[in-house]
Amino acid sequence: MTTTDYNKNMGFYVDMQRCIGCHSCEMACAECETNGQESMIHIHYVDRKHTIQTTVQVCMHCDDPVCANVCPADAITKDTFGVVQSANTARCIGCSNCVMACPFGVPNKKEEAELMMKCNMCYDRTSAGLKPMCATVCPSGALFYGTLEEIEEKRPHSTPVNKFIFGDQEVKTKVNIMMPKGSKELKVH
Amino acid sequence: MAKLPVNDELIIEKFGPHKQYTPKDGFKGVSEPDKLVKTHCCYCGMQCGIQLKVKDNKVVGFEPWKEFPFNEGRLCPKGVQRYLQNNHPDRLLSPMKRVEGVGFEPIEWEEAMNKTVSEIQRIQSTYGNDSFAMLSGVSLTNEKSYMIGKFARVALKTKNLDYNGRLCMVSAGGGNKKAFGLDRASNNWTDLKHAEVIIVTGANVSETFPTLTYPIWEARDNGAKLIVIDPRIIPLARTADLHLALRPGTDSALYGAMLKVLFDNDWIDREFIEEHTSGFEDTLASVQDHTLEWAENITGVPAEKIYKAAEMWGKAKTSFLLHARGIEHHTKGVDNVVGCINLVLATGRIGKPYCGYATITGQGNGQGGREHGHKCDQLPGNRDIENPEHRKYISSVWGIDEKDLPGKGFSAWEIIEAIHRGEIRGLLSICFNPLVSLPNNNYVRAALEKLEFYVTIDFFLSETGRHADIVLPGSLHEEEDGTVTTAEGRVVRINQAITSPGKARKDSDIIKELARRLGAGDKFSFENNEAIFNELRVASKGGTADYYGITYEKIEKNMGVFWPCPSLDHPGTPRLWEDRKFKTPDGKAHFNPAPYKLSTEMTDEEYPIILTTGRVVSQYLSGCQTRRIGKLVDQYPEPLMEIHPKLARQYNITDGNLIKVSTRRGELTLPANVVETIREDTIFIPYHWGGKHSANMLTIGALDPVSKIPEFKVCACKIEDTGIKAQDSQLSDAFQSFDN
Ligand code: SF4
Ligand code: SF4
Ligand code: SF4
């Protein structure tokens, strides 16, 4: 970790409005050498009967990650850059606690491997000064990786939001969602 | 007789399509490739830049190419997975001959070439030169397109050469020529992102050219209004300012009504019309009865929405209009295109910064492939094969006597008809899969079965190739140097990354060898593909598509050069018409009346529903390439029929059940996807599959009189629920929301 040139100013921004449901991000994510052809990002139709809208589900890298908090094996850790790492293979016991605890429904348990897997923000790329695969390929710009200044300049009609309210619980995240201009938080019912 | 030597199942078992996936840990060498080769995606007309990772002469992965100015690393799923074409188990590695009852047997090149050439000679000496036809494809580079145009006329000596661009944007070409005298998108995409209003009509940009959504979004970030005209709520339409869901086949009525609104409200540029156009009065007269009420009745779009669209378009200072196959695949495709162009000309918003007009070419080299002469009526540089001066110039470049240069031949569909009539007896095809991509499959299959000899050059055995007598294994995109011209008109470099495996050869070497054996070797003595390009440059010199000033070196240096580029010191032309000198005989841009006409087959009591066809994001054209890539297939494994819940209720259709769709030409059974994102009177089926999944079993071989493009986008059908549930394996990701 001492050799990394991870740039803390770079952030991850998700703009669902733009998602065209193409699955390019999923396929590119799977190309990451550490993923074993599994994608850590997931695209879903919200309700295909009524709309063509799709959603992108990526690990939000919470400030205080519940997934790590509930992990009995201490397999999940948040590093000094704020990246919540995937479960450590040597430690993960495949109990699925994280799967159930995550408010965003992110971690996936790979039954064959008895292992929790999720996005670690393309650590192999981001720590080497590259951008995550998904955000690089996303053809419509629904995924963006860069600085706050860049995104503010690029998207004058939206505001990045990283505060989510689930009932009484407030969750702050490293990843931002692009919301209509002036939004401050997102209440999830 | 080109009947199948054995049944389809046996051929599929041997030659696929099989799904290839990347191994769990990636291909060997992916982390330490020998080299990264900068090239372009092998699929659509965006031609996104990409870097291929190469290890031990194999493509093992990719790395985004961030510096390429158009896509800056962005790729759609096809681009991400394109590297899987190399090293694919279905790859053809040896020449083959058909053996009745056995299938295809590998043979040596010598035998394959001898047989091919002797059959060509036998057929031509018995029935005349034109009885042997050639069909080509625009996935091929400019070099190959040029070489094939020359090969057919100089070595094969036939007039009957056409290409699969005939199914792509020839209507746009026809319209462009009528209006501007030149066939190219007027601007680069940089202008698009600064336009105040954008019309996207008949173009499912989000699924067919996904990386083009980015500049559209950039324009919206800059405050642009977006108008989408399409019978379906395509992903781009979801957040558009206006979505006009018109009845398929009624586009020109809509544009006509919009033109009238523009005029009635004086949202036109009189000065531009006066000084730089002709034909306005006649065109205006032709829309006088196109009232909003009339248009609402024809198109099914509420009058207020049509007015609103005209207002948004009319009041803007800058604008961009984009269209694609949705308006071009009609028997009035050319009319639709000129109808669109009329809206652009009326507002004078062309040849200026941030103003433009473009047809989006579907195939990788849809643009360049239509300029260099593998079209039945065309010579290099976009020259006319019937124009004496053009003929004379090209004959001199080719070193032949003008009288030996054949004239205009049949178009792709007409070649099929001529085979049925017995006028054409032999066929050579390269990278064209008409059995899937032409309309009325059964008729096409019957034609193939009538051929006395059919030889194909390809790298996978396509549905059409299965009917061949001789199969010649050609090259993949990454196995040859060359250039392609993107939908913007930017000529870019395809860099060879690997050499062909097994006994497969470069397409250009195969053509050269055939030419040599046909006695025209001296005309095809190109040392390499750059030499072909250099001859193309000379052949295009002085034509409307002038490439003379473009060199490999210049392309590399500038990451592409826009044509026309008439001299070596010319920088290229990203934006056309800034000088207002149009290429028409009177030097003006032409308005053309685009009267509303009925589609060839209208709905009736027996066939009461409109069928329209198109594409999905994970598949490409006839699917010959993409149906072999595991994840692309899994995303959308088989065609689905999109149907509105109201229409579904009327026919007691249950979501996810198999539905029988029939037209006067055939029938097809496929799962219903009941969605509100389509018109109530229309069903949609994507066309990428062959055999019993082929949407083109149903479509009609009616042609636009000018462009000869078939009417893929409208025919009449009937539907019936079979009561059988589709299996999970048939259902795509789009079924996630099933409520059963
Ligand atoms: S989004 Fe879920 S998986 Fe990601 S850090 Fe937060 S709690 Fe953990
Ligand atoms: S690549 Fe971008 S547009 Fe495509 S599905 Fe992923 S987030 Fe959506
Ligand atoms: S298919 Fe088209 S949009 Fe997709 S990556 Fe290839 S060139 Fe780009």
Image (cartoon, rainbow, N blue to C red):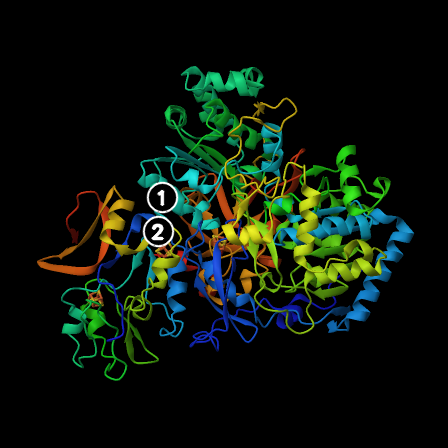
Kindly identify the amino acid type of the residue bearing the numbered disc 1.
Answer: Trp
* Residue B221 locus on image (x, y percent): 31, 41
Can you say whether B737 is above or below B611 in the image?
Answer: below
Image mark 1: chain = B
**The residue positioned farthest toward the front in the image shown:** B569
- Residues A168 and B52: in front is B52
- Residue under numbered circle 1: B217
* Residue B419 locus on image (x, y percent): 78, 49
* Residue A104 locus on image (x, y percent): 22, 62
For disc 2, the neighbor class at 10 Å (few under 14, some 14 to 19, many from 20) is many
- Residues A90 and B404: in front is B404
Can you say whether B69 is above or below A65 in the image?
Answer: above
Q: Quadrant of ligand 1?
A: bottom left
Mark 2: which secondary structure?
loop
Q: Are marks 2 and 1 in contact (CB under 8 Å)?
A: yes
Disc 2 to disc 1, how far (Cα)? 8 Å
Which image quarter is the C terminus of chain A in? Answer: bottom left
For disc 1, the neighbor class at 10 Å (few under 14, some 14 to 19, many from 20) is many
Judge: label 2 CB < 8 Å from ligand 2. Answer: yes
- Residues A59 and B245: in front is A59
What number is the disc on residue B638? Answer: none
What number is the disc on residue A141? Answer: 2
Image mark 2: chain = A
